[in-house]
Image: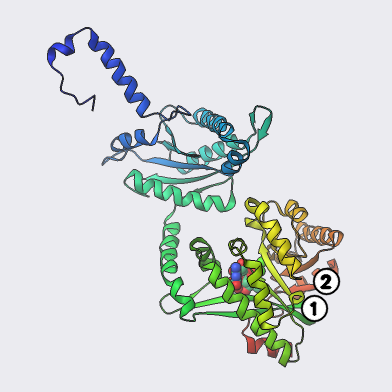
Amino acid sequence: VIRDMQLPQELKEAPEFEDFNNARDELMRQASQDFLTGLKNRQYLRLAEPRWVSRGSQPFAVFFIDLDNFKNINDSHGHSYGDILLKQVAERLLSIFSSDDLVCRQGGDEFIVISRRCDDDSITSLASAVLQSLASPYYVEKYNFVMGASIGVARFPRDGDSFETLFSAADTAMYQAKNVKNSFYVFSSELREELLETTDIQQALPQALEDGEFSLVYQPQVLDGQVPVGVEALIRWKNGDLGQVPPDRFIRVSEGNGMIIDIGHFVIDRALMDLADINEHHYCKSLHLSINVSIRQLQETGFTERLALSLETHGFPASQLTLEITEGIFIDDLQYLIPVLCDIRELGVRLSMDDFGTGYSSLSLLKQLPIDELKIDKSFVDNIATRNEDRLMVLNIIDIAQNLGIKVVAEGIEQAEQSSMLLELGCQLQQGYFYCGPVDLEQLIEYCE
Ligand code: C2E
Ligand code: CA
Ligand code: CA
């Protein structure tokens, strides 16, 4: 407004006008600066946009940087600590990027950097430098913190032709990075396709439960290479338009929109009913049942009570039920989770850590969580007969489990050599295509009999 004011000529020539001009510049500067860190702010970005994205503009990269676990630090140490941390983050960012780059605080613990250095190598080296720099310890008064960051990168013009579309692409890529933590992810057309598919899934999910499109298959767990003693329930979804959608795809989406709660209860009830039925009427008596649950399900208030009710309704003994939880998503939610897991165990239900060894904090989690079983991930089993390192790894996992009094199950066994090697190493409980893939109820009964 000040800039655009039409001023009379005599005022412009007056000596006070110099001051007026300075004051105006100062106001402009303040309005475009983040008061805490001194970086450029969102307001500034909006004003700068036309310079960057007009037709024929040079290519550039947008780095969307989000701190991992910043909220925890803020909550536990207070906002003034958080503020000091954010200032240090800003300094670190400024030391990596050059004065030609635009370094902004988008708000909260989110930062955006726009840089002309946007070839693949530059993006990789800049993002790596940011990750490395932000991950080194912060000293604030008498505490020191470590904090990671997740970065999403989008490129102009290929990923969007406005700041809005570019930021949204970078934000999407950032969420992919968040799954791994302390990493970066560059937006791609595959990711865009996956997002479109996600939208389709989101739209089809709510009706799917009502229309009975979900079903369960069961994969046997075999003791000593011979006797089926349990099964893992695995969900299947067949939709009219989308066809068979793999659980890896739709479970994640359903966790995002909360549908997993209802889907999860469907799985629990159907599996308990099926297994109670098998155990009563068939040769394969007292089969154990393992059910996958996601963390999101455990966050529902009353989950344990509802589980107890389901067990009672179907007359299935709690001691024959195991809930499998994936370790990868644990870390953020420990305080909340531990009491819930303890309640579940109070019922007599066991807990298994799925995909063990693939997350980055497996061992520390094992120490903190009330766990009865480990599932050795398929990625170790794959090379167990051929790679010494993998064999040693599995041997160590089995060793640790035995010391802690925890059961081990190996999954993804596809070959006889893998099975016998695991038996030799002391893993008696095994699951995989070598024995039997996931099958429907009838086939399961046949297999067991
Ligand atoms: P998971 O819990 O690790 O399940 C094992 C996956 O490996 C299953 O894939 C299974 O079919 C597959 N598999 C088993 N043996 C072999 C083998 O020898 N070779 C190979 N290549 N694969 C094998 P599926 O059924 O596609 O499930 C994928 C993931 O989806 C599961 O991984 C689990 O995380 C999730 N999921 C499946 N059902 C449910 C459910 O009811 N609730 C929840 N929350 N998640 C589920
Ligand atoms: Ca599982
Ligand atoms: Ca698994």
Q: Helix, strand or loop at disc 1?
A: loop
Residue 97 point in image, percent of width and height:
48, 31
> For residue 329, what is the image quadrant?
bottom right
| N-terminal label among 2 and 1 | 1
The residue at which mark 1 appears reads as: 225
> For residue 150, what is the image quadrant?
top right
Q: Relative to the observer, which residue lies in front, 432 or 321? A: 321
Amino acid of disc 1 = Gly
Residue 358 visible in the current orientation: no
Ligand 1 lies under 8 Å from the Cβ of mark 2: no
Residue at the location (67% across, 57% down)?
A: 337
271 shown above or below 160: below
CB contact under 8 Å: marks 2 and 1: yes
Q: Relative to the observer, which residue lies in front, 425 or 210? A: 210
Residue at the location (68% across, 77% down)?
A: 311
186 shown above or below 216: above
Residue 22 visible in the current orientation: yes
Amino acid of disc 2 = Leu
Mark 2–mark 1 distance (CA, rounded to whole Å): 8 Å
The residue at which mark 2 appears reads as: 423
297 shown above or below 363: below
Ligand 1 lies under 8 Å from the Cβ of mark 1: no
